[in-house]
Amino acid sequence: MNYYQVLQVAPNAAPETIKEAYKRLAFKYHPDTNNSPDAVERMKQINEAYQVLGDPSARAQYDLAHHIVPNPEMANQVVAPASMQVANAQTQQAPKTAESKTYCVNHPDTETYLRCNKCGKPVCMKCVQRTPVGYRCNECLGVQRAGYYTATPVDYALASIIALFLGAVGGFVMLLIGGGLGFFGIIIAIFGGPIAGGIISESIRRAVSKRRGRRLALVACVALAIGAIGILLAPALPFLLLGRPELFMRAAFNIGFWIFLALALSTTYARLRA
């Protein structure tokens, strides 16, 4: 597949021209605006072509692999440095097509012209992501992201204890202030839930010195829910033990409390995941 033909531009097209061509073709063949049977496949080809030609380093590798020299300036600025890397191979006069082809390390049948700018492995579009510093393979991104998560088991324990305690306190305050106020209790819950979630999440962040964990937010939310629900159901549990489930359900069915808990949980999760 010739990426220049896909985007309908010349090999010496400027980056601005390639970008304009991509926008024009994307608008024309996007499945939301084009109902033709081949629109999805065409859009896939257009995206793949722009991912390569829209990136200077990927375009240089593509041009070198296809022996494209758009103009002398581009040859000096882009192609020449890459040519030095294959000078020895060219002097051996091996078949050009065989030498220029590279295949994805994860998908051996997929030809590619992209390389991870960190480890240098050839990867296809399925195995690479575009970052502000260039293309990175999923493996390098996984290692990089793993460095973000430095929380220890002690941090998880602290988060659980803090969320459990503050969740119980918040649930008790909510029942005490807004438990019997009806509509006004719901208003209090709407404003109090996010405030409680912010206090809980900030307390946890300070306790763990702002270290991050993959499941820190989830653990905190579970502990928060247990603490708050425990406060709600503890007074009503004797009714259930005495065979009065209707009184238990009446005590448990507190709309304001559940709104408060839902908003506190969502706020805590969002802030600890950020």
Image (cartoon, grey):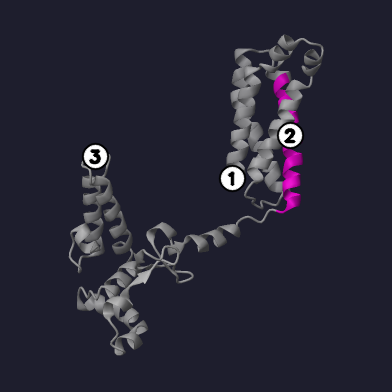
Magenta: main secondary structure equals: helix
In the rendered image, the vertical position of residue 264 relative to residue 153, given as above or below: above
Q: Image point 21% across, 79% down: which residue?
A: 72
Quadrant in the rendering for residue 196: top right
Amino acid type, label 1: Arg
Amino acid type, label 3: Thr
**Which residue matches tag 3?**
33
Percent x, y of residue 16: 24, 60
Quadrant in the rendering for residue 64: bottom left
First-in-chain label (2 vs 1): 2
Secondary structure state at the residue bearing disc 1: helix
CA separation in Å, label 3 and label 1: 36 Å
Percent x, y of residue 199: 67, 37
Quadrant location of the N terminus in the rendered image: bottom left
Q: Which residues are magenta?
A: 152-175
For residue 166, the mark is 2
**Which residue matches tag 1?**
273
Secondary structure state at the residue bearing disc 3: loop
* Of the two numbered discs 3 and 2 in the rendering, the one whose residue sits closer to the viewer: 3
For residue 32, the mark is none
Residue 162 among magenta residues = yes
Q: Image point 23% across, 77% down: which residue?
A: 73
In the rendered image, the vertical position of residue 146 relative to residue 216, given as above or below: below
CA separation in Å, label 3 and label 2: 51 Å
